[in-house]
Amino acid sequence: MKFLSTRGQTDPVSFTEAVAIGLAPDGGLFLPETLPGIGGDWERLARLDYATLCAEVLGLFATDLDPAVLKDIAARSYRGFTHRRIAPLEQIGERLFVLELFHGPTLAFKDFALQLLGNLYEHQCRVRGETLNVLAATSGDTGAAAIHGLLGKPGVAIFILYPEGRIAPLQERQMACTGAANVFALAVDGTFDDAQAALKAVFGDQAFRARHRLSAVNSINLARVLAQSVYFLYAWLRLPAAQRLEVEFVVPTGNFGNVLAGWLLQKMGVPIRSFKIATNQNDILFRLFATGDYRMTAVAPSLAPSMDIQVASNFERFLFYSVGRDPARVREIMETFRATGAYRFAHFDADTFSASHCTDAEITGIIRHVYQKYGYVCDPHTACGFKEINRDRLSVVLATASPAKFPDVIRAAIGQAPTHPALEALKSRPIVKHPMRADAAAIKAFIAAHGV
Ligand SMILES: *Cc1c(COP(=O)(O)O)cnc(C)c1O
């Protein structure tokens, strides 16, 4: 199986290459040249444990990896999860389920993709006899999940930049209290955008980039999307056969990554009825699906910070299919969007997609309501998913983070705060962080001194 760029100006590459490169050289995103069919034999698939199902699904794409290697990578990726079912599906109402995606090491759904990506990187380094310095800028969950995906891996060092004083204290502890020698938490003097811009400048230095074998962790890596498809299938298979045709997945999203993962599965033959795109007040995706108008506005910080996103980068993959897989059209639309900050679409599949948005006041109200009505405590991101549940369907709300990560919001809503042993343990560990100017030269000097 080969992988193409959405912009059509990159030669097709193998799975391993697409994962290693991340963003295609023409600025596009990788997609499989054809979507394989999944299933038919649902009862066989329903008997597989999570890691085995993951290896089966990924094996349809990763045809350049030995199936035994893939199986081992998948098994190791989900071994550190604390729930025996990895992604438990909990029924909380008559036709209402929650898919809990927060039982990984950093208590948010990004662990599903980044544990796997970490092991794929490690495998590649070993096969090629190379080392790798991984860099990312983060405003929260991605950095923590990336660190925990690469923690202690031989031949890999990871440098995470975050804006000092501008992320939640527990999120900082998840990055700065690991005690691992290959992890460097760089506390940048400035905003997230300053950190991001400095990082871009580091990657812009081609000679430095090649000399230190830099790699970026970001939300557009194909392996992340495919890893996320697996839990949609796993959840769907847990439902009684008679109800599987009426399932609506409700997906709290900012970047479109998680919705895309589910939708690809539908295109591969899993008869998922529909998807609801749940946004917070940063609602570019809500406006898009409600009106066809894709228009950038300023980001307004919200109680669900991991969805405070202005441009939904994974949307380009969806766009590619929407325009009949025509890369020239994708280039034209992305160029119009880049130049004007807006694009108008004529039509979306309203039968498959609906969307909602949620203000901060609504988030707090929903956390309280869900607790009172169902006795279930949800985090502020997941709360967005409970807005306007479609009563004609069987709804599965994706729970993207543990409520214990957001004690202040939960306390304000229900008068008590959940705790989690993994987070409590962090509070007594020393913070090891490196103060950093938002400046490419300073970052490069640090990498040269501490990298592998
Ligand atoms: C990253 C994140 C999201 C949004 O994910 P997308 O990739 O934008 O779909 C939602 N909730 C939490 C807790 C997250 O960390």
Image (cartoon, rainbow, N blue to C red):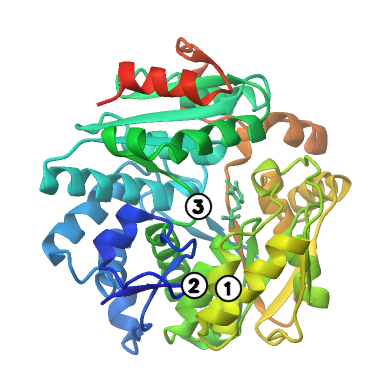
Instruction: Identify residue for label 2.
Output: 7
Left or right: where does residue 126 sit relative to residue 349?
A: left
Front residue of 401/392: it is 401
Q: Which mark is residue 331?
A: 1
The residue at 42%/39% (across/down) is 146
Q: CA distance from mark 2 to mark 3?
A: 18 Å
**Element under label 2?**
loop
Left or right: where does residue 304 sit relative to residue 88?
A: right
Crowd band around label 1 with a 10 angstrom C-alpha radius: few (<14), some (14–19), many (20+): many
Residue 18, visible in the rendered structure: yes
Q: Position of residue 222 (x, y in %)?
A: 40, 62
Identify residue type, mark 1.
Arg
Q: Position of residue 2 (x, y in %)?
A: 28, 75
Instruction: Identify residue for label 3.
Output: 219
Q: Is mark 3 within 8 Å of ligand 1?
A: yes
Identify residue type, mark 2.
Arg
- Quadrant location of residue 330? bottom right
- Quadrant location of residue 87? bottom left
Front residue of 298/380: it is 298
